[in-house]
Image (spheres, rainbow, N blue to C red):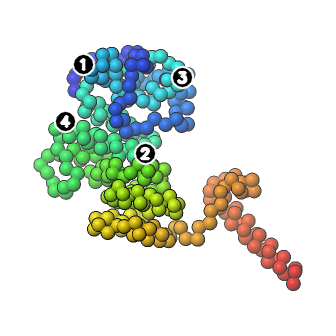
């Protein structure tokens, strides 16, 4: 990395480009609205970090500040403050990943691809990497360095990177919290076709695999025995937390119940059912 003096300068938005392969999504959500409001009132307090684009004079690639650029565009700004780093793409990747990992809301998929991207960049810089071997090497492995720099264990880094082997539709379910992280890691060992078959059952039956089910599917897959029939058999099992479930959309009952937490809502509905059950008993007694 070159040791040159850096200073803040204003650059036209049209000359700034998203980082190629950026693993972090720019979401148009409540946080974005707050950011827009802040920029509208106080301007951009923290300059964007950029690097010159190769073979494109006067054009820059954003390292950090994609959300600020999005908000600035929405607000109609023509220029934004930046700090230019004349660094290699590998150094820029490490900076990009590290500057975003400690945001308040980082999706599992974002972490997965960010760690993978950083690991590959560090490998190209000459660090040693071995994600599969458990032997202790004489050099500090790249994934151990990534883990230490980001407060994660070597094994946790490996597990996150495994998520990049999931098909997009299953990875979305992980981001939405519908598939837990640990079962998702085990499912990543299934072939693409096996994952697509699993997805069909998930969508059809509105259920997701437990860790036990994911482990069994992984084992059968490694043995070459995970057929569509086996997936259906495993996914049709009744799980303890799904027994005798009765779902009613909140919208259908919200006009009858007071506002409160989910627990308060459940208590109210149960008491209402208890009250109605007693009413039916009394009605039957009067009809005798």
Element assignment for label 4? loop
Element assignment for label 1? loop
Whole-Å distance between the Cαs marked 2 and 3? 26 Å
Whole-Å distance between the Cαs marked 1 and 2? 35 Å
Whole-Å distance between the Cαs marked 4 and 3? 39 Å
Q: Nearer the viewer, residue 279 or 263?
A: 279
Taking 110 as reference, is 96 above or below it?
above
Q: Which residue is mark 2?
A: 107
Disc on res. 4: 1
Quadrant of the image containing the N terminus: top left
Count of labels shown?
A: 4
Element assignment for label 3? loop
Whole-Å distance between the Cαs marked 2 and 4? 27 Å
Label 1 Cα neighbours within 10 Å, binned few <14 / some 14-19 / many ≥20: few
Disc on res. 182: none
**Horizontal placement of 169 versus 250: left or right?**
left
Which numbered disc flags the more N-terminal residue, 1 or 4?
1
For image coordinates 40% across by 38% down, the residue present is: 24
Q: Nearer the viewer, residue 101 or 199?
A: 199
Whole-Å distance between the Cαs marked 1 and 3? 33 Å
Taking 52 as reference, is 160 above or below it?
below
Which is in the foreground here, disc 1 or disc 4?
Answer: 4
Which numbered disc flags the more N-terminal residue, 2 or 3?
3
Q: Quadrant of residue 34?
A: top right
Taking 60 as reference, is 24 above or below it?
below
Q: Which residue is mark 4?
A: 125
Q: Which residue is mark 3?
A: 75
User: Is residue 150 shown to the viewer in this render?
Assistant: no
Query: Where is residue 218 drawn, in percent x and y?
Result: 33, 64
Q: Are marks 1 and 2 in contact (CB under 8 Å)?
A: no
For image coordinates 36% across by 35% down, the residue present is: 22
């Amino acid at each position: 990395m070159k040791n040159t003096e850096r200073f803040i300068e204003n650059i036209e938005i049209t000359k700034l480009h998203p980082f190629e392969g950026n693993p972090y999504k720019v979401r148009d959500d409540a946080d974005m609205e707050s950011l827009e409001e802040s920029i509208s009132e106080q301007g951009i307090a923290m300059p964007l970090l950029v690097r010159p684009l190769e073979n494109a004079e006067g054009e820059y690639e954003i390292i950090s500040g994609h959300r600020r650029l999005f908000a600035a565009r929405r607000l109609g700004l023509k220029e934004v403050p930046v700090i230019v780093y004349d660094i290699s793409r590998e150094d820029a990747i490490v900076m990009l990943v590290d500057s975003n990992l400690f945001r308040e809301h980082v999706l599992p998929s974002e972490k997965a691809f960010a760690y993978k991207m950083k690991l590959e960049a560090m490998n190209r810089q000459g660090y040693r990497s071995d994600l599969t071997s458990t032997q202790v090497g004489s050099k500090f492995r790249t994934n151990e360095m990534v883990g230490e720099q980001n407060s994660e264990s070597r094994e946790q880094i490996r597990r996150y990177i495994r998520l990049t082997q999931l098909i997009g539709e299953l990875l979305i379910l992980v981001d939405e919290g519908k598939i837990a992280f640990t079962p998702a890691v085990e499912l990543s060992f299934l072939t693409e076709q096996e994952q697509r078959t699993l997805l069909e059952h998930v969508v059809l039956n509105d259920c997701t695999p437990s860790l036990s089910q994911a482990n069994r599917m992984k084992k059968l897959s490694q043995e070459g025995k995970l057929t569509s029939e086996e997936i259906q058999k495993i996914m049709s099992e009744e799980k303890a937390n799904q027994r005798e479930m009765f779902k009613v959309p909140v919208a259908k009952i919200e006009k009858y119940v007071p506002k409160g937490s989910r627990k308060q809502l459940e208590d109210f509905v149960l008491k209402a059912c208890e009250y109605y059950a007693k009413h039916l008993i009394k009605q039957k007694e009067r009809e005798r």
